[in-house]
Every structure is written in structure tokens, then in C-alpha cells.
Image: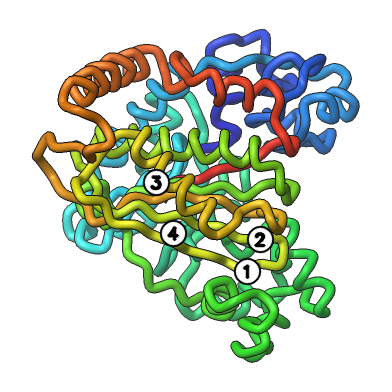
Amino acid sequence: MDAFFAAVEQRDNPALRGKPVIIGGDPRYRGVVSTCSYEARKYGVRSAMPLRQAKELCPNGIFIVGHMRKYEESSSRIMEILRDYTPLIEPISIDEAFLDVTQCQTLFGTAEKIAREIVDRIEKEERLTASIGVAPNKFLAKLGSDLRKPKGFVVINPEDVSDLLKDLPVKKIWGVGPKTEQALLSLGIPTIGILREVPLDLLVSNFGKETGEHLYQLSRGIDNRSVVTAEDAKSIGHETTFQEDTDDREYLTAVLLELSDMVARRMRRYQVQARTITLKLRDANFHTITRGRTLMHPTDFEEVIFNTALELAREVEWGRKKVRLLGVSASNLTRGGDEQLTLFNGEDRVRLKKLHQTVDQIKDKLGEHAVTRGRIANLKKNPRPPGWRGRGE
């Protein structure tokens, strides 16, 4: 979706149309931009930017706290439109998803025709605009959807991949943030075409095995990942890359708690429990540490997920080096069963289950931020470092 939260506000309030709308709250207090309209982007305002900086760049900006329930309702209606064309949908955020239409084309026409119908329906039924990339794989489709926003429509054919990627800056590669971009620039690699000429072993030695192989494959337009639906998911996880590397353990602990909350919430929504909890840490030198622990009994309690992830973090002495990425995932998923880890006795398990059900119901009705833990609320009020961007897997 194009500037989704801001676009919804402009749709519902005609007085905001054509004006620089910035979602995130009062710029007099610490906080970050959630998203902003394209009118605000002309001033240099961007997502995850501190609100005070956004105010300096755009003094006439209209700052809005935002209405998550309204955004979620619109998102749900858009996802229903997508489901009219294929069951193979992988949402990656509230306003973005992958669709695999390989097997649907005899029914609905070519992938391009399906994409145009979807764009038209979203604009007609939701009065919002979307940008779409049609391509042979997920990386190229996402790249295409970002190339010509707003209202972008990009079709990437296999024979066009090499020429298309050649002159694009390396930051266009999915997962390349400011730190990775700077590291590549310092190595004399400003474009994807030049990156394509770098040997794999050199990339691995500079960025580690995971990131090095990621850069090597995507620079060639290779992405063999399939679209994974909620029903087919092997794991449920969330991770965040910080705008500024940090060794503040109090801050990291609060973020770890929120990530655990997000994972548990999705597990209960999909009615699954996990036996294995995995922590992912990446330091300022791009060294990635992954540690997992298999539980005696499966769980969907955020308390268990958080405590397990925190123990793993302490074991690897997190914060000894500044952290740039933090993630939590739950795997070894199972359906059914009500037995939770014996960290809680029977009475506590029943009490916690009822509590989670109540909180989930409130969030389903009023939005994800209707109820939150005090520690997470304090994190949101006083983010350290200034802003972080997260994504689900």
C-alpha cells in the first residue's frame, strides 16, 4: 500500500488531502514517524525518523497519533480482496503481502491481469492506492513494487533481470539497511551490478555467511523462497534492525519482550504452540549468533517465550558488543493440546490462559496497541535508540 496509515487518514478526512500528514504523535515528545504522506516526504520526512527531526524538516506538517484499529480494519478488507484470487498469500506486514498466482492464471488470466484487477479493486472498494511488482520471485516482486511508488505497477520478466539490477544502488537489495550500505560503499560497491562481480568468499568474510550469501544470490536476481501461508509456516518469528546499534540491556530487554509478545499473539491466532524458541542476534560487525532451546512442553505463552529468549541472550553475553539486529522465533510447531511449560502450576496456567484470551479479544476489537505491558509502553515513550523498524517472518 502507498503511505498506508497516512492515506487512510486522508481518505477519511478530506481536509487532510494534499497536505503533509505525519503519523506518529506529538513532535514535542520523543517518538518516531510511523509513516507519512507523499506530501511530507518531499520535505525529507521518512519512516522511523525522530518526530522532532520531522518537525524541523516539515514545520507545517500535520502530526497525528494514528488510529490502529481503523488501519487494521482496512488491511483486513484488502487481504480479503487478495484471497479472491489465490489462497497462497504471505502477509509480511499490515500493508504488504506476497501472492503466488502461478496456479491461478487459467482461471483469472495472466499474473499481470490479476495484479491490475487487484489494484483497481483496492482503489474502488477502499479508495486507496497500491503499488505492485509482478516478477518470477519474491525479491524481484518486492523490488518492483518499490520502484515507482505511488501507484507503481512494474512487471519484471526473467530476461530483463540483469539489465534492471545492473545500475540500481545496493540499498535496493532487500535487507540492506544504512549500515550494510555503508559497509558496501566502503568496499567500493555502490551498485548491484558491481556487487554481482564480487566473489562469494569475499562477501562472506566481510559480512558473515548468512548476509554474504544473501547479497550474492539477490544481486543475481536469485531467490528460491516460496510464498509461505500461515497454515504452512514452519516457524513464527519477529525481528528488528535498530537504526543505531545499541548495548543498552534495559532497552534490548524491553524490545525482546515486545518481540515475544508479537510471536505469542500470532501463535494463538493460528492456534499453534511451539516446542523450540530461537534467539537471533547480529552485532555491529555483522556477526550473527543464533541460539535455540527445545522446551519440555509446547507453549504459546509470551512469558515462556520471553524467559527462554532472555536466558539464551544472557548465555551469549548480549550487550558485550553493540547489537544491530534482534529477533525471536518459535518453531517445531504443533496444533492442539493445552499443556504449557511447567514454569507455571496448573492454577497459574489457567489464569494466564484466561488473561491471554481476554487481551487477545480486546486487541482483536480495538487494535494491537489497545493493551500493552508497562515496560513496552515506556519503551515506546522513550525509545533508545531513536526508533526501530521491525518485521515479521
Q: Which residue is mark 1?
A: 287
**What x and y, as percent, mark residue 215?**
59, 74
Q: Given this view, does label 4 or label 1 mark the residue nearer the observer? A: 1
Placement of 186 over or under 367, stated as above or below = below
**Mark-to-mark CA distance, 1 and 3:** 22 Å
In terms of sequence position, does the residue under pointer 4 or pointer 3 come before the other? Answer: 4
In the image, what residue occupies the spot 85% across and 17% down? 60
Q: Given this view, does label 2 or label 4 mark the residue nearer the observer? A: 2
Q: Which residue is mark 3?
A: 308
Q: Which residue is mark 2?
A: 283
In the image, what residue occupies the spot 74% across and 56% down? 178
Q: Is residue 114 something one can see in this rendering?
A: no
Which residue is at the front of the view, 344 or 128? 344
Placement of 38 over or under 64, stated as above or below = below
How many residues crowd around disc 4 within 10 Å: few (fewer than 14), some, or many (20 or more)? many
Q: Secondary structure at mark 1?
A: loop
In terms of sequence position, does the residue under pointer 2 or pointer 3 come before the other? Answer: 2
**What x and y, as percent, mark residue 97?**
40, 46
Q: Secondary structure at mark 2?
A: strand
Picture quarter containing residue 120? top left
Which residue is at the front of the view, 49 or 264? 264
